[in-house]
Image (spheres, rainbow, N blue to C red):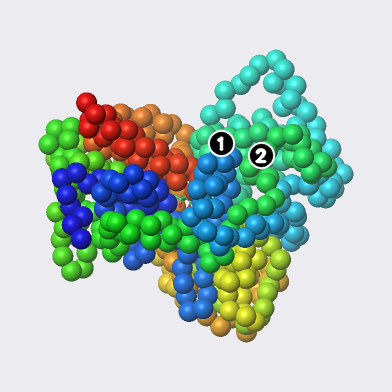
Amino acid sequence: MDFSRNDSTIILGGGLAGLSAGFSLVKAGHPVAVLESGPEVGGLSRTIRHGDFRFDLGGHRFLTNNIRTEQFVKDLLRGQYLTVPRKSKIYMNGKFFDYPLKPSNALFGLGIPTTVKAVSDYGKEKIKKLFASPEHISLEDWVVAHFGRTMFTLYFKEYSEKVWGLECGNISEEWVSKRIDGLSLGVAIKNAFFKFSGRRVSTLVDKFIYPTLGIGQISERLKEEIEKKDAVLTNTRVSRINHRGPVITNIIADNCERQYDVKGSEFISSIPLTNLLKMLDPSPPGDILDAASKLRYRDMVIVTVMIDKPRVSDLTWLYLPEKKMPLGRVHEPKNWSLHMAPEGKTHVVSEYFCFKGDSIWSSTDEELTSMTVQQLAKLGLIEMDQVIGNCVIRVPHAYPLFEVGYNQYYSKVVEYLRGFKNLHIIGRSGMFKYYNMDSAIETGRDVAEIIIQNSRFIIQG
Ligand SMILES: Cc1cc2nc3c(=O)[nH]c(=O)nc-3n(C[C@H](O)[C@H](O)[C@H](O)COP(=O)(O)OP(=O)(O)OC[C@H]3O[C@@H](n4cnc5c(N)ncnc54)[C@H](O)[C@@H]3O)c2cc1C
């Protein structure tokens, strides 16, 4: 198959964003080539197969407010999906609390003095707002304003610091305000008492779509559709992006067998933004590279243990906010779809948030598995002698890291990239945005639509 034509659109990265762009272009009759460095497609939304077990890199629920995107995913899955009820808990102070917060345990389960303090702190913030609307710069500012300081310290501080590896005063408010937009202590209480509060807050939605064979099924279906006409090359890493002034001319990509020199007319990148800049040849000016070096990502390690027992919980997710427990979040894939584990067995997937090269990232697989098994046993989920297997996956660039002040560097980099006439950035790592799957899909589709429109204009013109 000739995937390097002068009129092809070359797509860097075969995650949901890149594949959605490829899918839309192929359906409109445009030639594409998708280049993916991993052995399979799906990126962060892939499903790992380990013997008869399947698991996502941290359970992925599909949820969207966009009807078109929901229908797109449903059509793609051709009925092979489930609607899964969400039931999650947080483990704190040796107890399991319901998540989303219910007033009965979030407030009243704390003991009367703490409850009174939490409510009065929240009241104080409400009164403050009547007199001035303060600027919220950090996550800490935002959460204190919406939930009060007591609730911030109890429910947000440790978990946020675990996820981001930064003090809450250094994490930009952008992450939390977008993620739990519309949620405040008042709304959380209303949601707990009344099933429907009149406003859909996505953090609190209690049902979601899940493909029968794991979230990776969405990407696999996209790949199948693209491959009916064009190429999706896995194990193929882009290493250089050549340009002549504002025009990308070709890219160099390698797999273990050969090097490709790939030409095209349009280039779409969903690979981490900071890596894209380093690959440009000639290199961007020093101040742009300097700005890019200030943008960081948070990485992850996923440790899965296979258990000789039909089920260990009935939970969708279990959150572990306390810093004394290195584990961040846990899920049991069988509670998402029964097809994720063989009959009579189950597995537990544990997420560790870390930075590439730190002590978690650099621990051996044996050390990580042993630490995980001990923690899961401590939680009462498993017994050590029930473990029959393990699998450790290191996931770079899991989250763009929104440090206070990151925006000035980000804007500079994006402004520079806008200068290229035929380069488009899409997706979560590609755009350095905290995008969920629905937004990643939409960024790919939107760019494809622009390319299709422009080519019509050129043909007609
Ligand atoms: C732990 C976790 C849980 C999540 N849970 C949810 C959830 O419940 N619901 C939800 O909607 N979203 C969730 N997300 C977000 C979701 O995973 C992302 O929104 C989505 O997968 C982003 O897709 P993408 O294509 O933009 O990026 P990616 O998936 O990062 O795709 C980029 C691709 O580029 C490839 N690549 C990188 N460098 C190169 C190179 N040099 N050459 C070629 N290819 C390259 C990568 O291998 C990757 O496949 C979660 C994310 C994480 C980390």
The structure residue drawn at horizontal position 56% and vertical position 36%, both measured from the top left corner, is 178
Q: What residue type is labelled 1?
A: Lys
Image mark for residue 178: 1
Q: Is residue 4 above or below residue 80?
A: above
71 or 103, nearer to the observer: 71
Q: Is residue 269 left or right of residue 206?
A: left
**Residue for point 40% across, 42% down:** 445
Work out whether residue 439 or residue 21 is closer to the camera in this orientation and state it. Answer: 21
Residue 37, quarter of picture: bottom left
Q: Name the residue under label 2.
A: 201
Regarding residue 432, the answer to whether it shows in the image is: no
Q: Judge left or right: residue 260 versus residue 363.
A: left
| Image quadrant in which the C terminus is located | top left
Cα separation, mark 2 vs mark 1, equals 11 Å
Instruction: Name the residue at 55% across, 46% down.
Output: 70
Quick one: which residue is furthest to the front in this view?
Answer: 460
Q: Disc 1 on helix, strand or loop?
A: helix
Q: Foreground mark, 2 or 1?
A: 2
In the image, 236 versus 118, the foreground residue is 236
> Picture quarter containing residue 342?
bottom right
Badge 1, how many Cα within 10 Å: few under 14, some, many 20+? few
Secondary structure at numbered mark 2: loop
